Amino acid sequence: MLSIALLGDASANSGSDGGGKTATVENIADEGLSGVDLGYWAWEADRAGEHHPFYNTTLTDKGWIQVTSALMPTASSLGARAAGGLGALWLSLLAVPVGALAAAALARQLGAPSGRLAFWMIGAASPLTFYGTDQWEHGPALAVSLWTVVLIRTHPLGRKALATGALF
């Protein structure tokens, strides 16, 4: 993953809402939390934002916003301040091996003699691989979800928490 990210352009993105998220991270890195407004150069001609260059950008009382969660751009902006564009991807990049390790642990729990196949399939041949090179919450969310399943299966407290949550 790191080699793919190193070979690529850190300011490039998948073309969906990743561009707006990347711009938001850069703005927050430069201006702090007030940097969430991406602005819109054609606002006078397109007040509805139908042609805003960043997909899924919405006009709010804070400006033109393209944020689906506060945690990801805030954490990524810390990496951007420390190491530029590649640093902004630290959370996405870290999610790949963390998610792959969780897949390996889950495979062993389910009876596989080794978790190697699951590790490599999830780490190198799944959507997680793609998410690891873009400014999306999907990678970290998948890694956390996989570890949640592993922990629920191994710890009685996890099963109780799951049962309690299911009641509500």
Image: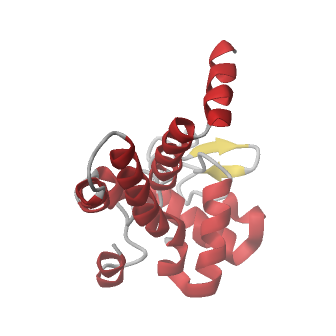
Of 59 and 83, which appears nearest the observer? Answer: 83
Check the image and name the residue furthest to the bottom.
83
Which residue is farthest top? Answer: 167
x, y percentage for residue 51?
A: 44, 47
Q: Where does residue 91 sit, x and y in percent of width and height? A: 53, 66
Closest to the observer: 68 or 141? 141
Tell me residue 101's x, y (percent).
41, 59
At x 51%, y 48%, the residue is 147
Q: In this view, does 50 lie above or below 96?
A: above
Depth check, front residue: 120 or 39: 120
Where on the picture, by quarter, is residue 24? bottom right
Determine whether 99 is above or below 75 in the image.
Answer: above
* Point 56% across, 37% down: residue: 152
How many numbered badges does the structure rendering display? 0
Tell me where residue 99 sits by quadrant.
Answer: bottom left
**In this rendering, position of residue 165 left or right of residue 86:** right
Direction from residue 161 to residue 121 in the image, left or right: left
